[in-house]
Amino acid sequence: MNVRPGVEKDLPAVSAIENLCFLPEVAFSEQALEHLLRHAHTLVAVDKEVVGFVAGVVFGKTGKAITLDVHPRCRRRKIGSMLMEALEGEFAALGAKVSLLEVSSANQAALALYFALGYRYVAILESYYGPGRDAVSMQKSLVTDPYQNNIT
Ligand SMILES: CC(C)(COP(=O)(O)OP(=O)(O)OC[C@H]1O[C@@H](n2cnc3c(N)ncnc32)[C@H](O)[C@@H]1OP(=O)(O)O)[C@@H](O)C(=O)NCCC(=O)NCCS
């Protein structure tokens, strides 16, 4: 298993995994994924073929995770953890002090993963994914020295 930057030729594999991971109404379109592969920070996990994908962007001192996908047949092998930690490393290398994300409040697997990685709740975002479908905003500090944690 290795993790490397995503490239445009990963689009078919990434798109296939996205559609296995999310319902059509919330999955990123192929066009959106192509945009992410071109313009965002993306990483893929490869085990002979692409089995996972993560994307994020950095704005100033804040990194924002956009999507995290692990192929259903490869779950609970720490691939999601590995991808998130690699993305956080990229965020930190680019000067980010904090990593932010939003996740459906019904997504128990992702919530458990993010808690295990040290993310904590910031807010509940009511009906973020449509009527009655709430999200939670979560955040993790990327610095060990609390005096460097001021993102303003
Ligand atoms: C969420 C997701 C990325 C997790 O990927 P993964 O590679 O299976 O996660 P990991 O193996 O790194 O799991 C790390 C820890 O997270 C927690 N966890 C992960 N999946 C879990 C599940 N289904 N139920 C409970 N806890 C879970 C566990 O604490 C796990 O550690 P353990 O296996 O030692 O108990 C994967 O299930 C997925 O792609 N889901 C669909 C897409 C999605 O929801 N993405 C996140 C959107 S914000």
Image (tube, rainbow, N blue to C red):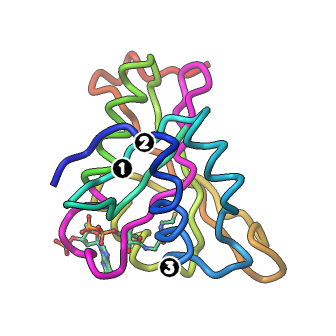
Q: Nearer the viewer, residue 32 or 112?
A: 32
Comes first in the chain, label 3 or label 1: 3
**Residue 142: where, in percent of width, then height?**
36, 31
Magenta stretch contains residue 66? yes
Mark 2 crowdedness (10 Å alpha carbons): few <14, some 14-19, many ≥20: many
For the C terminus, give its image quadrant. Answer: top right
Amino acid type at mark 2: Gly
Mark 3 crowdedness (10 Å alpha carbons): few <14, some 14-19, many ≥20: some
The residue where tag 2 is placed is: 6
Ligand 1: give its quadrant.
Answer: bottom left
**Residue 79: where, in percent of width, then height?**
25, 61
Amino acid type at mark 3: Leu
**Residue 65: where, in percent of width, then height?**
52, 46
Boundaries of the magenta span: 57-81
Q: Is residue 94 above or below residue 108?
A: above
- Secondary structure of the residue carrying numbered label 3: helix
How far apart are labels 1 and 2 at the CA level? Answer: 5 Å
The residue where tag 3 is placed is: 20
Q: Is residue 138 above or below residue 126?
A: above
Amino acid type at mark 1: Val
Q: Is mark 1 within 8 Å of ligand 1?
A: no
Mark 1 crowdedness (10 Å alpha carbons): few <14, some 14-19, many ≥20: many
Q: Nearer the viewer, residue 109 or 82?
A: 82
Q: Residue at x 71, y 53 (%)?
A: 31
The residue where tag 1 is placed is: 44
Comes first in the chain, label 1 or label 2: 2
Q: Residue at x 50, y 78 (%)?
A: 107
Q: Quadrant of residue 145?
A: top left
How far apart are labels 2 and 3 at the CA level? Answer: 18 Å
**Residue 30: where, in percent of width, then height?**
66, 59
Q: Nearer the viewer, residue 93 or 18?
A: 18
